[in-house]
Image (cartoon, grey):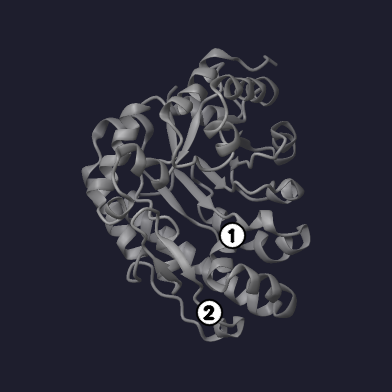
Amino acid sequence: MNYEEVISAADFNPRNPHVPVVLWAIGQTYAPFAKIPDNEYYADPAKMLEAQVKFYERFPDVLTIPGIWPDLGLMAELGALGAELEFPDDAPPQSRGGAFEDIREVENWEVPDPKKADYTSQTLDYLKYFCKHLPEEPRKKWGFLDGHIFCGGPGEISGLLLGYDKFSYAMYDYPQLVHILLRKVTDFIKSYIDAQIEIVGEPKRVIIWDHIPGMLSRELFDEFVHPYMKEVFTHVEKATLRIYHNENNYPHLLDLMRDIPANVCHIGPKHDLVESKRVLKKCVMGNVHPIQELLLGTNEEIEAKCKTIIETAGRGGGLWLSTGGGMAPETPVEKMQVLIDCAKKYLPPSL
């Protein structure tokens, strides 16, 4: 599989009869794969890049998303905006608490410059290191780091800064203040994207994660998150691939998500891929359950699931075979290989 075939599948015009496999791989996959302790992986850009390149060398014919990238988990955006963080020895950086005790604090909150703020500036420094030291072969083959953008979305960042419980109550009790928070977070995200563009060039492949839509009703999503998410994706709408990542399940929002200028949607494991593709009118990425099926299932069970996905949802392109969310850290590479072998073995029905 090559990059042109992955893009072609996203455009519903497959140049290859096989469905491409795209693996969502982040530090929780890379660090254990390379046998690098978490506290060393996240603290050292050289070790982080080493781990990611090793994974690439194991799967050179598979596109990984977010890809080779200075992935610091939630640390960059949340830390820069004032959330409390912790750095476990054996886990990715985590948020210990939000930035606000009360929603009313957001009125006078001054959003920092991502190029100067803690954690986003660190990520940008890591990105410069990656650009300087990434080997030429993966750069040429998959376009890694060339116009590559990765960041969180306005809904989830806002929810985590305030705390999901307070955010949920505030949408009813203080709706105008929630809009102020979302407005400031969205402006920060766009500035952070612009800072990345200064390093990697004009956007070509953009990945935005935001899991909170799966936690909201249609009405709340439509009022509070949809317009700001749409604004972020519109900011990078000239990119070839605009990927929305959410392993939460959001079938009740599909028609609203259709309006977001993403062209690939990562789909949670409880979605019907055929119906999701039909309503979204976008390429769907998924949706083998990362734990129940990929981690805990037998190879035969994984193959049966992949065969069903390819033969039911692969017709006419618009499908990337993947997990319905991030892979579990303990997932053996042999299980990942089953997905790749299935994509080579089974073909979607022809039109």
Between disc 1 and disc 2, whose residue precedes?
2
**What residue is disc 1 on?**
231
Q: Which mark is residue 301?
A: none
Residue visible at 45% across and 43% down?
A: 205
* Residue 105 in picture, x, y percent from top left: 55, 84
Tags 1 and 2 in contact by the CB under 8 Å rule?
no
Give the amino acid at mark 2: Phe
Count how many numbered circles sit on residues in the image. Answer: 2
Q: CA distance from mark 1 to mark 2?
A: 24 Å
Q: Nearer the viewer, residue 25 or 36?
A: 36
Horizontal side of 290 relative to 219 (left or right) equals left
The quarter in which the C terminus is drawn is: top right
Give the amino acid at mark 1: Glu
Q: Is residue 285 visible?
A: no
Residue visible at 74% across and 34% down?
A: 278
Helix, strand or loop at label 1? It is helix
Helix, strand or loop at label 2? It is loop
- The local crowd at label 2, few if under 14, some if 14 to 19, many if 20 or more residues have their Cα within 10 Å, is some
When the figure is inspected, residue 120 is found, relative to residue 31, above or below; the finding is below
* Residue 339 in picture, x, y percent from top left: 52, 24
Residue visible at 36% across and 62% down?
A: 87
* Residue 241 in picture, x, y percent from top left: 51, 40
**What residue is disc 2 on?**
100
Which label sits in the foreground, 1 or 2? Answer: 2
